[in-house]
Image (tube, rainbow, N blue to C red):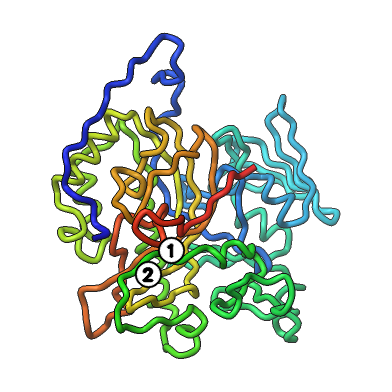
Amino acid sequence: MFMKTVATVIVLSAVLSSGSAFAASQLPEPRKPQLGIDVIVDGMKATFPDTEPFFDDADRTMVPVRFVSEKLGAEVLWDNKAQIVTINYKGKVITMPVNSKVVTVDGVEQTLDTSAILSEGRVVVPLRFVSETLDTIVKWDGSYNAITVSSKDFLDRIEDGTIKVDTYGRKLRINTTSNIPKSAKDWQLLEDTENYAYDVAKPYTLPRDKATMSAMEVLTQYTINKKSRDNIVMSIKNNYKLALNVDYRTIDASTYYKSSLSLYWKTGGTFPTEVLYRFVDFIKKNHVITQGYAFPDANSLYRKNGEYFMRTKFKFKVISSDDMSQFSMDSYNPSSYSESPDWVKKNQWYIGYADVRLDSNTSNYFIETLKMKNDENMFILNGPKGSPAYSYKELK
């Protein structure tokens, strides 16, 4: 029912004039897709307005320098002519020339294994070096691709009980009686998450005599260890690393299909091979280039009529597409339970929430092996031709 039908897809050829916005010379170079990296600073997950953190060739996490000023409370100065970043924080001065591994801290030179660089028009810097130099504690958790940056004051407040955090070090809301979402009782409320994210409608499921449990009920009544939740998170992240990073100039049908085999609970049953091949053909003919990430909330796992879902934060933009409403498996040739968004603008970053449907082929270790069930999650509806069970907004 939720699967895409094998139907003939007619792609109309676009007539491209010399003044068309589509021109290969205007497009960015093909990029290597990366997993979404959760960055949590003093208990608050960061939202980046454009350039996301990424790993450089030295396997260092790079972040936009603006992040340093906004999240770590430092002053950042940029000398465009000399291409030098200067970071001032509580009397400490860090100077980082772009593309140089030699930096200075309070006038003393140090040689790093990586350097500040320009990426997508933004200056990005190595997060660990900058954060630790600014006297914060940095921890990497590869089990769900996340990095936490914590000040001593923040850690002391956790220790004395002033601040409460979840399993992942994110601040829990202390006030749970005012300025809360309508569905507050269903979720573990986090300080860094806006109310609208909790009130997004839930996807349609067939009415069945099966368990329905809120995320809070699953948290309190089920014993699900962090490893199991991390496995689900990474499954979703890896899936959308593939699904939200397509490029008509480099995509290959066979490679795309093989890459998807381990990402779904039952690939052959989710979509036959020919559907994926037709999708790739559409991507090529429609000149699609996208960039995007998925950030599942590990503690948001819930059940509805026996089915499992995990609320997920999505960030994406469409760089090129003749048909801006169809740019991914989520939006391509939708079933009656999903839709193609007609509001997407070229090169505009969007952020929002939707629920990812999960399933497993394994009965003995069911929750531990949950993976994505369908390719329609981002623009799903709450019923056949129903209302959106998702919410997105433009990033400014």
- How many numbered discs sit on the rendered protein? 2
User: Can you give x and y, in whole percent of width and height, for residue 208 in the image?
Assistant: 30, 79
Q: In the current view of this chain or complex, which residue is farthest to the right? A: 91
Q: Which amino acid does label 1 sit on?
A: Asp
Residue 212 appears in the picture as rendered: yes
Residue 17 placement (x, y as % from top left)? 39, 11
Q: Residue placed at 58% from the left, 73% from the top? A: 183
At mark 1, the secondary structure is strand
Q: Which residue is drawn at 60% across and 42% down?
A: 124
In front of the other: 330 or 205: 205
The percent coordinates of residue 203 (x first, y second) are 40, 64
Q: In this view, does 281 lie to the left or right of 344?
A: left
Task: Bin the neighbour count of mark 2 within 10 Å (Cα to Cα): few under 14, some 14-19, many 20 and up.
Answer: many
Query: Badge 1 local density, few (<14 within 10 Å), some, or many (20+)?
Result: many
Separation (CA) of disc 2 from disc 1: 13 Å
Residue 270 to residue 120: above or below: below
Q: Mark 2 points at which residue?
A: 232
Q: Depth-wise, is mark 2 or mark 1 nearer the camera? A: 1
Which quarter of the figure is the N terminus placed in? bottom left
The kind of residue on which mark 2 rests is Ile
Quadrant in the picture for residue 375: bottom left
In the depicted view, which residue is nearer to us: 298 or 101?
298
**Residue at x 43% of width, y 43% of height:** 341
Q: Position of residue 176 (x, y in %)?
A: 69, 79
| Marks 2 and 1, the one that precedes in the sequence | 2
Residue 12 sits in which quadrant?
top left
What SS does tag 2 mark? helix
In the picture, measured across the screen, residue 227 lies left or right of residue 12, that is right
Which residue corresponds to the image point at 77% horizontal and 39% vertical from the top-left?
77
Residue placed under numbered mark 1 in the picture: 355
